Amino acid sequence: MKREVHEHLDTALEFLREAEVLASAGLFRGAIARAYYAMFHGATAVLMERGIERSSHHGIIAAFGEFLVKPGHVSKEFHRNLQEAFAARSDGDYESTVAFSRQDTETMIQRAKEFLEVCRIMCP
């Protein structure tokens, strides 16, 4: 595994742990953001493992769909979850009236865990 791939996977796991800590403290907006960033770094790692690099969040999300979902390497559900996590993180960061429930947050963290498990399997 390339060093950069390993670093992205490590960062993803660290962000996932941060999401869990923030959620346990009732800081749902921050937990949602960290769950998204865990998924983002996982997706970045999988793409880098295949020699695909993008410089933006939209680029990573689009490439994940194009190079991993479209050919059938990954379920469409994971791409949808990544897109929804990005939207939730954006809403939480930029919309002051957005509020996330404990259930919303737990669901997002569970999705991030499942997403990262797939990413780790795809980066031998």
Image: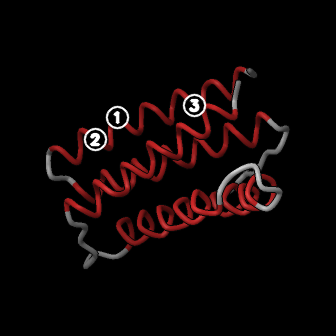
Query: Which numbered marker is on residue 34?
Result: none
Q: x, y (%) of residue 107?
A: 33, 57
User: Dot 3 surroundings within 10 Å: few (below 14), some, or many (20 or more)?
Assistant: many
Residue located at (53% from left, 37% from top): 117
Q: Which quadrant of the rendered structure holds the N terminus?
A: top right
Q: x, y (%) of residue 116?
A: 53, 40
For the rendered model, the colour scheme is: secondary structure
Marks 3 and 1, the one that precedes in the sequence: 3
Residue located at (77% from left, 33% from top): 49
Furthest residue to the bottom? 97
Residue 93, quarter of picture? bottom left
Q: Amino acid at mark 1?
A: Arg
| Mark 2 lies on residue | 20
Q: Amino acid at mark 3?
A: Leu
| Mark 3 lies on residue | 9
Q: Amino acid at mark 2?
A: Glu
Residue located at (75% from left, 22% from top): 2
User: Dot 1 surroundings within 10 Å: few (below 14), some, or many (20 or more)?
Assistant: some
Residue 92, quarter of picture? bottom left
Whether residues under marks 1 and 2 lie with C-beta atoms below 8 angstroms apart, the answer is yes
| Mark 1 lies on residue | 17
User: Dot 2 surroundings within 10 Å: few (below 14), some, or many (20 or more)?
Assistant: many
Which element is circle 2 on? helix
Distance between mark 2 and mark 3 Cα atoms: 17 Å
Residue 77, quarter of picture? bottom right
Marks 2 and 3, the one that precedes in the sequence: 3
Q: In the rendered image of this protein, does residue 93 appear above or below residue 119?
A: below
Which element is circle 3 on? helix
- Left or right: residue 14 versus residue 41 is left
